[in-house]
Image (cartoon, rainbow, N blue to C red):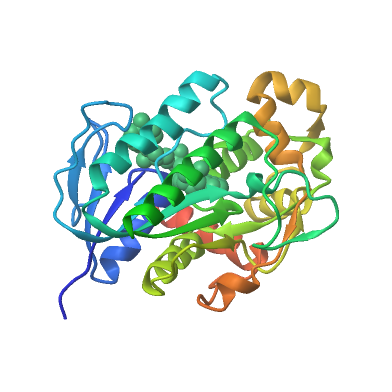
Amino acid sequence: MMAKSVFVTGATGFVGSRLVENLIDKEYEVTSLIRRGKQSHPKSDSVIGDLTDSKLEIPIENVECVFHLASHTPLEKNKKILEKVNLEGTKNLFEQIKDKTKSLIYISGLGVYGDPGDKIVDENFPYNPDTNFVKIRLEAQKFLEKNCNDLGINFSVVHFGDVYGPRGWFYEFLIKRLLKNTFRLPKNGDYYKGFVHVDDAAGSLISVLEQKTNNESYIVADSTPAKFRDFVDFTAEQIGAKRAGSVPVFLAKTVLGGDLIKLLTTSMKVSNKKISQIYDFKFPSYKEGIPNVISELKSKGLLN
Ligand SMILES: NC(=O)c1ccc[n+]([C@@H]2O[C@H](COP(=O)([O-])OP(=O)(O)OC[C@H]3O[C@@H](n4cnc5c(N)ncnc54)[C@H](OP(=O)(O)O)[C@@H]3O)[C@@H](O)[C@H]2O)c1
């Protein structure tokens, strides 16, 4: 069987790097978009470029799919920078790949659903973003959806819950700070979140690709909506750290910015019924996933 080729943006990031690893394990031929000075997976080809560069060139042959994960995080408070990377960068990317791919999978978050109150959110729930960060990302999604439809490129969007693993916010902000006893919970962590282990985030993206879906959206979170406080307490217990204290929302906003704190403290319970029809979660609950991440961190010497 001929290996299938795919192109991944955000390939050096937390989720993108795991996606590339998993694709290569499944014998896909992967080309990664990486910025100058960064390293791609040794078995991936790479294209060096920055999405914000109007002269961006992506000299790839035809691929089955482009996974678009590159993004600025909601830690960026400057709306102009967010627009430049997340919207203009997406348009630059599309210009380069529009005649070279059969499908495009756009990766987004649950912030598109705004504040759903007590309702369980599934893919039929209306979009209602209430942060600049998500409004800009949704504009990029709509741009891709329309242009893919116009050109006959299969388009799907995947909305991740909070992805935890041995990198990203979970390691950098939670584990490291719990160990130093400096992690604080805005609103005492009293809100529901949909968590997902990074292996399941990457695995579900590959399932979406292999289903050859078109004009579909998927919510990707595990089967156990959990309060942020419980998730954090469980992590602390597993690494032998003290329980986190809390911090008033207004103070947290001054440090991390309004968009990030709003996204973090909005309570949301989601259903993963649709993605579960095409993907079997390895870690249906954080109580199984966190011990796995901790043993990976220990095996890499990142945790005692
Ligand atoms: N992690 C989560 O919990 C979560 C939750 C919901 C949705 N998501 C979405 O999932 C995707 C991946 O998230 P992540 O946590 O893996 O993010 P990440 O670790 O911050 O990685 C972002 C990636 O985008 C690249 N990038 C940023 N600006 C770029 C530019 N101007 N040109 C080219 N590449 C650029 C980064 O490259 P460098 O390495 O060079 O910086 C990096 O590879 C994002 O779209 C994110 O919004 C993530």
Left or right for 193, reference 91: right
Which residue is pictured at 68% across the width and 45% down the height?
Answer: 241
Which residue is pictured at 72% across the width and 43% down the height?
Answer: 114
Which residue is pictured at 48% across the width and 27% down the height?
Answer: 83
* Residue 301 visible from this viewpoint: no
Quadrant housing residue 29: bottom left
Residue in the foreground of this view, choosing between 209 and 251: 209
Which residue is pictured at 67% across the width and 52% down the height?
Answer: 235
* Residue 64 visible from this viewpoint: yes
Quadrant housing residue 178: top right
Residue 69 is situated, as x and y percent measured from the top left of the image, at: 41, 47
Q: Looking at the picture, does residue 200 appear above or below residue 51?
A: below
Q: Looking at the picture, does residue 89 appear above or below residue 114?
A: above
Residue in the foreground of this view, choosing between 63 and 179: 63
Residue 73 is situated, as x and y percent measured from the top left of the image, at: 51, 34
**What is the number of callouts on the image?**
0
Residue 189 is situated, as x and y percent measured from the top left of the image, at: 79, 43
Quadrant housing residue 210: bottom left
Residue 101 is situated, as x and y percent measured from the top left of the image, at: 26, 57
